[in-house]
Image: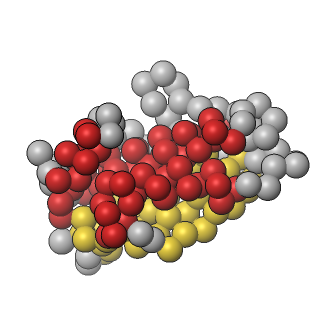
């Protein structure tokens, strides 16, 4: 077990099997040492977190949804690294998208759910640049979607 997976396990987290794309795209593209991971939605075995943040779901639930996105991103990283997450050199950037209601403005606080997970999993190598954007709608009514750029060896 990699050090990263040991840290996740200590936090009570288990990585799922990476989710297959639902349209005409690939889950990730590697170019040299950089890997661009397609957006991962707030999906888990129970069906995930869906709805509009600030209308259907609250901030705390939305932060958990962003954490789910982060877990799904790490599952994709594991696939990129052929099972060895210790090959992740750096989480370079996260792009967070929150399906936000008209009066919800705590978008960065939501995306912190994914950002905090990256630091928990990868330590200082998990600190990253980031964007956090509120959007009108996300695919399949998921509450949050996060994509990533990571450096691997």
For residue 74, side relative to residue 100 (left or right) = left
Residue drawn at point x = 59 percent, y = 55 percent = 111
For residue 83, side relative to residue 141 (left or right) = left
Coloration of the structure image:
secondary structure
Quadrant hosting residue 88: bottom left
- The single residue placed furthest to the right in the displayed view is 103
In the image, residue 107 sits, relative to residue 137, either above or below, namely below
**Is residue 88 or residue 8 the one in the foreground?**
8
Residue drawn at point x = 55 percent, y = 69 percent = 130
- The single residue placed furthest to the top in the displayed view is 46
Instruction: Return the x and y of residue 35 as percentages of the image width and height.
Output: 34, 67
**Is residue 21 or residue 147 the one in the foreground?**
147
Q: Quadrant of the C terminus?
A: bottom left
For residue 56, side relative to residue 28 (left or right) = right
**Is residue 23 or residue 59 the one in the foreground?**
59
| Number of numbered discs overlaid on the protein picture | 0
In the image, residue 125 sits, relative to residue 143, either above or below, namely below
Instruction: Return the x and y of residue 17 as percentages of the image width and height.
Output: 30, 36
Q: Is residue 89 visible?
A: yes
Quadrant hosting residue 71: top left
**Is residue 90 or residue 27 the one in the foreground?**
90
Residue drawn at point x = 26 percent, y = 40 percent = 10
- The single residue placed furthest to the front in the displayed view is 10
């Amino acid at each position: 077990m990699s050090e990263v997976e040991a840290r996740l396990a200590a936090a009570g987290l288990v990585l799922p099997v990476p989710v297959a794309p639902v349209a005409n795209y690939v889950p990730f593209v590697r170019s040299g040492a950089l890997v661009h991971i397609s957006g991962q939605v707030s999906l888990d075995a129970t069906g995930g977190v869906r709805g509009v943040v600030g209308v259907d779901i609250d901030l705390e639930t939305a932060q958990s949804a962003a954490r789910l996105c982060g877990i799904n991103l790490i599952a994709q990283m594991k696939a990129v690294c052929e099972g060895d997450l210790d090959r992740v050199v750096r989480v370079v950037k996260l792009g967070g998208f929150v399906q936000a209601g008209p009066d919800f403005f705590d978008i960065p606080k939501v995306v912190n759910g994914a950002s905090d997970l990256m630091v928990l999993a990868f330590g200082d190598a998990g600190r990253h640049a980031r964007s956090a954007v509120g959007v009108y709608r996300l695919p399949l009514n998921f509450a949050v979607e996060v994509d990533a750029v990571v450096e691997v060896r």
